[in-house]
Image (cartoon, helix red, strand yellow):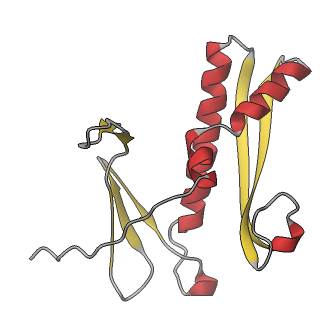
Amino acid sequence: MSESPSSDKTPVTEEVTVRGNAAGFLQDVYVGKHQFKADEPVHVGGTATAPDPYDYLLAGLGACTSMTVGLYARTKKIPLDGISVTLRHSRIHADDCEHCETEVGMLDRIDLDLQLTGNLTPEQRAKLTEIAGKCPVHRTLKSEIDIRIKEKPAEH
């Protein structure tokens, strides 16, 4: 991570650039020295040649969760051998969510299944499960997010 040019020195991520054309959904994604693709499933008009944007969202959350739990276990010398995070995204009716602020319409739900392997006590399992909900991406998704959109002139 690099430092923000602002005076508050808030860490920022690598710049992400996504390029596509109007002919279809397939996109080229660039993150620093890494390149990958994104697409949509066939049933919505894509070619399914790459994960869709929600797959990447879930992958980011899953990776962050696993990294956070692993770091905590290493720091606290908890005998954690492995971490598996399985995620699913769905849309649900707000009235089906008793703990949600949204009361009407639809909202997004992410189900996250955490599997921990190792010679762990019930207390250690409970603490690691609690820590899973504190990863930075989880906190970002649960917070208010300010997305600023502006058109940038095309380079010729």
Residue depicted at 59% across the width and 33% down the height: 67
In the rendered image, the vertical position of residue 19 relative to residue 44, given as above or below: above
Q: Position of residue 149 (x, y in %)?
A: 36, 71
* Near-viewer residue (25 or 155): 155
Q: Position of residue 93 (x, y in %)?
A: 82, 75
In the rendered image, the vertical position of residue 80 relative to residue 85, given as above or below: above
Can you see residue 51?
no
Task: Locate residue 66: give its quadrant.
Answer: top right
In the rendered image, the vertical position of residue 113 relative to residue 121, given as above or below: below
Residue most extreme to the top: 77
Residue depicted at 59% across the width and 82% down the height: 42
* Near-viewer residue (60 or 131): 131
* Near-viewer residue (110 or 79): 110
Q: Position of residue 77 (x, y in %)?
A: 68, 10
In the rendered image, the vertical position of residue 18 relative to residue 135, given as above or below: below
The quarter in which the C terminus is drawn is bottom left
Q: Position of residue 154 (x, y in %)?
A: 17, 77
Can you see residue 63?
yes
